[in-house]
Image: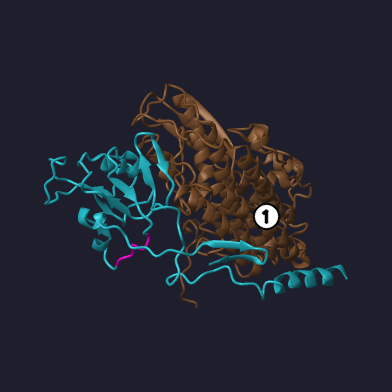
């Protein structure tokens, strides 16, 4: 023990934390290897059982999506741009396609707009079910892991029939969608979505009305309405704090303004409210899908024919959509070449991560998983 | 009292599922059924035909060796090479045809969209694992073979619940 050499204070290596024996504060590294934390690290300082300082450390899965987009043309960008969120791949391609359509001046056929809305809503449910499953297992509720993963299969089956792939669909293209749906898809979709909605109602008894869940999540990590706005949070985090902001309502894209749905808002702003908003969103998604299937034109073109390497004008566009996590925007700068000059992805996960130090400071360490995953945060998307 | 009744309600909702048939199915013995014969593309109308995006199928009597599929893949996965084939075709003077490396392919199907001669489609075959990296490279002769698939399991929904059958 005595001959062990410690570096002097000035020579301490970056990332190496050394504590004195009589120090009350202890530093904990949550992640990046822990499978629950999902490829990111949270550096937490605890005083006994209470968190006194939180420092989220993302960036472990940075892939350079934005730089990669500058070397590929508007069509070959599609497969790699959906990789940050493979469970929500339709919604991450949505703003890109809307932006490129505006750049190239394309008019999307009416049937393609409805198909896009159906695919986006199915994908939102797939993402939320996956998120909910992880939230369940984070809180030690293994039934809530099995049920969403099983029910997710109903929607994956529909997306598989529609797009030809179970995850990474590459279904949206500038100018419409890749292919029309197979015959009698409407009946199958209606049947499975109705059954899915019936199953969602069963989650209330086992999870949302469960006193054990309520005792763990109620009044933990409270984010007030003012703080939610000030910190720039978005999506379910913002709506759980009582701000009614949904891009589908505020800036309707494609055919959302013709469809009948409400946004779900809760006032509490705690982890329980944040975990409940996505579940309520899924009911609205089922409503939108049924509504869109009814209003969709029965036949017609679904895709505009494009030149092999379309060129945009010398301009820039910004379009955003409501993804499973919140507002997802893409800023595309075009300089008259087949490739975008610059593509900036504004991701909701990163915006919600900003709220984490604010929420965790002062909480008990045991509440950390309940607060962390309720932020609807996807590390791979935040790093892009 | 509220806590106790809540826990009993939660347990009860789980217990109800003991008697129902399970939703999962035995994968290697049973396989999920897909729509159609795989993803296809109609270059005349410029729209695809819905289907599963699995392993490709190449029609030697239609492929002209134009390399458009290889060019389409260039910025995506670089999975398609164009080697020489021994057969001689009147419509394929260069005698080159696509060879696909499934270690690189991302199954986006944009090569199918690029083919103007109805020569490259995708199939329902997704079991492509191999012990070697070379085993993942499919030559034009291997791509020509129509895969044997026995996929018959579908989701069935009745009042008792959903199951694969």
Q: What stretch is highlighted in magenta?
A: B126-130
Left or right relative to B158: residue B35: left
Percent position of residue A184, x then y:
53, 48
Q: Where does label 1 land, which residue?
A: A197
**Chain letter for the part of the structure drawn in brown:** A
| Residue A70 in which image quadrant | top left
Residue A119 at x, y percent in the picture: 54, 45
- At 26% from the left and 48% from the top, the residue drawn is B80
Viewer-proximal residue among A83 and A18: A83
Q: Identify the residue at image location x=51%, y=44%.
A: A90
In terms of depth relative to the viewer, which is nearer, B149 or A197? B149
A327 in relation to B39, above or below: above
Q: Position of residue B43 (x, y in %)?
A: 34, 36
Query: Which chain identifier belongs to the cyan chain?
Result: B
The residue at 36%/54% (across/down) is B123
**Residue closest to the eye, A263 or A6:** A263
Outermost residue, right direction? Answer: B1
Q: In this view, does A129 lie above or below A5?
A: above
Residue A132: which quarter of the image? bottom right
In the picture as drawn, the residue positioned furthest to the top comes out as A314
């Amino acid at each position: 023990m005595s001959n062990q050499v410690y570096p002097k204070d000035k020579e301490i290596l970056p990332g190496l934390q050394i504590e004195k024996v009589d120090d009350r504060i202890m530093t904990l590294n949550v992640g990046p290897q822990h499978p629950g934390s999902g490829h990111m690290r949270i550096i937490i300082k605890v005083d006994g059982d209470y968190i006194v300082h939180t420092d989220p450390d993302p960036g472990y899965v940075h892939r350079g999506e934005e730089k990669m987009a500058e070397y590929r043309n508007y069509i070959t960008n599609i497969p790699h741009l959906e990789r940050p969120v493979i469970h929500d791949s339709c919604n991450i391609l949505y703003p890109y396609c809307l932006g490129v359509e505006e750049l190239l001046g394309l008019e999307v056929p009416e049937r393609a707009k409805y198909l896009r809305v159906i695919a986006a809503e199915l994908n939102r449910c797939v993402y939320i079910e996956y998120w909910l499953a992880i939230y369940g297992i984070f809180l030690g509720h293994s039934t809530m892991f099995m049920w969403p993963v099983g029910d997710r299969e109903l929607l994956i089956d529909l997306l598989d029939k529609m797009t030809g792939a179970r995850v990474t669909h590459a279904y949206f293209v500038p100018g419409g969608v890749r292919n029309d749906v197979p015959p009698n898809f409407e009946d199958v979709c209606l049947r499975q979505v109705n059954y899915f909605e019936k199953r969602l109602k069963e989650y209330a008894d086992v999870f949302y009305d469960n006193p054990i869940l309520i005792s763990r999540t109620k009044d933990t990590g409270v984010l007030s309405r003012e703080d939610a706005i000030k910190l720039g949070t978005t999506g379910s985090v913002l709506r759980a704090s009582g701000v009614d902001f949904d891009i589908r309502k505020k800036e309707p894209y494609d055919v959302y303004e013709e469809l009948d749905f409400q946004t779900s808002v809760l006032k509490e702003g705690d982890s329980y409210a944040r975990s409940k908003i996505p579940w309520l969103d899924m009911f609205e998604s089922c409503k939108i899908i049924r509504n869109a299937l009814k209003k969709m034109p029965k036949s017609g073109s679904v895709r505009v024919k494009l030149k092999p390497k379309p060129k945009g004008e010398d301009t820039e566009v910004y379009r955003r959509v409501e993804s499973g996590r919140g507002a997802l925007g893409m800023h595309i700068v075009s300089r008259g070449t087949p490739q975008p000059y610059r593509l900036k992805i504004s991701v909701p996960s990163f915006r919600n991560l900003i709220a984490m130090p604010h929420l965790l400071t002062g909480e008990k360490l045991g509440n950390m998983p309940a607060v962390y995953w309720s932020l609807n945060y996807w590390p791979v998307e935040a790093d892009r | 009292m509220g806590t106790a009744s809540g826990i009993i309600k939660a347990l009860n909702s789980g217990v109800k599922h003991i008697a129902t048939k399970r939703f999962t199915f035995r994968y290697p013995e049973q396989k999920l059924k897909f729509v159609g014969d795989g993803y296809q593309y109609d270059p005349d109308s410029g729209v695809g035909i819905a289907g599963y995006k699995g392993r490709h199928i190449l029609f030697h009597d239609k492929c002209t060796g134009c390399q458009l599929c290889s060019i389409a893949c260039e910025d995506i996965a670089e999975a398609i090479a164009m080697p020489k084939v021994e057969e001689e075709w009147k419509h394929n003077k260069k005698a080159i045809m696509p060879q696909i490396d499934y270690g690189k392919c991302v199954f986006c199907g944009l090569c199918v969209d690029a083919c103007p001669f109805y020569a490259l489609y995708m199939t329902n075959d997704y079991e492509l694992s191999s012990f070697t990296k070379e085993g993942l490279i499919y030559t034009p002769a291997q791509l020509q073979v129509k895969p044997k698939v026995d996929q018959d399991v579908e989701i069935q929904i009745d009042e008792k619940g959903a199951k694969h059958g």
